Amino acid sequence: MPIPDAQIHPEATGAAAKTVAAHKDKNNAALTFYSGWFCPYVQRVWLALEEKGIPYYYEEINPYHKDEYLKINPKGLVPAIRSDGVNIYESHILNEFLEDKFPQSKRLLPERAEQKAVARIQMDLVTKKIIPAYFRCVQSQDVEGQKAARKEMYDACREFGTFIDSSKGPFVGGKELDGVDIALAPWAVRQWVLDEHRGGPATEAECGQAYVKWAKAVQSHPTVLKTTSDREHYVPIYQRYLKDEAQSEAAKATRAGKVIP
Ligand SMILES: N[C@@H](CCC(=O)N[C@@H](CS)C(=O)NCC(=O)O)C(=O)O
């Protein structure tokens, strides 16, 4: 029985492939970045590495063929980093590690303890509410479940929008991406799955003006673009959840010209 994920396209493509090619020099790298080009958690760390301008060696891993990689991350998940002989994993922990290890590079989290705690509270909303609802919405095979998850997600995105100071935005970090923006950015990149298969584009009515502006700004941010592969190679990853769609109530309603809110 083939495992669909094990057949993921083997490498980054498009703009992301160029970024990979620029990070294949082991001699001048401060660390090794174990990546899977397709993974949103990886993209979090990739964004932090690029925004901070850290010299890294990029190693592509298919985490569904674990083998040797279990020695780097016993959980078998990407992303991971090997730095000074130590293996580190979990995207949030990795991004905090990068802040600690490279204090001279661009800061992505506030230095003041109180402000840093606030940033962690904001990232908690992303981790505990927005991301689980995103995956529930994609994975749910019934329209009611999809609608409920979409609402849950975009309600939380509206709350995320309140973290943005509209006089400084579009990002939580003002004009520049910061750690809180980066925590959610990969899912804004993958919002097309919901736009195209789970009820249409996110509207200001459901998730607020600040979030809609934020998502658009993220989707066209240069660092986001240079860590994103060609769309066609992401499609098969989501396809298993969308494959029965032709038969689904959502697809039938769409074909009948009904809007799925
Ligand atoms: N909590 C982890 C999640 C990482 C994760 O789920 N990575 C997926 C790819 S997107 C993976 O490596 N999956 C391999 C598997 O499930 O065996 C993090 O934040 O780094």
Image: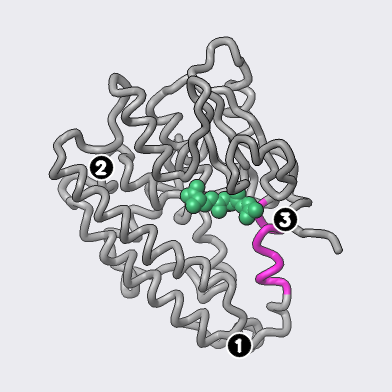
* Between 85 and 123, the one nearer to me in the picture: 85
- Tell us which disc is closer to us: 2 or 3: 3
Do callouts 3 and 1 mark residues in contact (Cβ within 8 Å)?
Answer: no
Residue 173 disc label: 2
Q: Is residue 64 left or right of residue 20?
A: right
User: Which kind of residue does numbered mark 3 sit on?
Assistant: Asp
Q: Which amino acid does label 2 sit on?
A: Gly
List x then y, in percent, for residue 142.
Answer: 59, 85
Pointer 3 residue: 5
Residue 93, horizontal then vertical, whole percent: 40, 42
The verdict on label 3 being within 8 Å of ligand 1 is: yes
Task: Kindly identify the residue that appears in the image at 64 percent across and 45 percent down.
Answer: 230
Query: Label 2, label 1: how many angstroms apart (C-alpha)?
Result: 40 Å
Circle 1 SS class: helix
The quadrant in which residue 116 appears is top left
> Which amino acid lies under the numbered mark 1 shown in the image of this protein?
Ala
Is the Cβ of the residue at disc 2 closer than 8 Å to that at disc 1? no
Decide: is 118 above or below 21. below
Report the residue at 72% width, 77% height from top.
244
- Identify the residue position indicated by label 1 in the image: 253
Residue 174 coordinates in the image, percent (x, y) = 23, 42
Check if residue 90 falls in the magenta segment. no
Query: Compared with residue 197, is residue 228 higher up or lower down, i.e. above or below?
Result: above
Earlier in the chain: of badge 3 and badge 1, it is 3
The answer to which of 234 and 254 lies nearer the viewer is 234
Label 3 neighbour load within 10 Å: few <14, some 14-19, many 20+: some
How far apart are the two marked residues, 2 and 3, measured between alpha carbons?
A: 35 Å
Query: Could you tell whether 241 is left or right of 213 in the image?
Result: right
Cα distance, mark 3 to mark 1?
Answer: 30 Å
Q: Give the range drawn in magenta.
A: 234-243
Q: Is the magenta stretch mostly helix, strand or loop?
A: helix
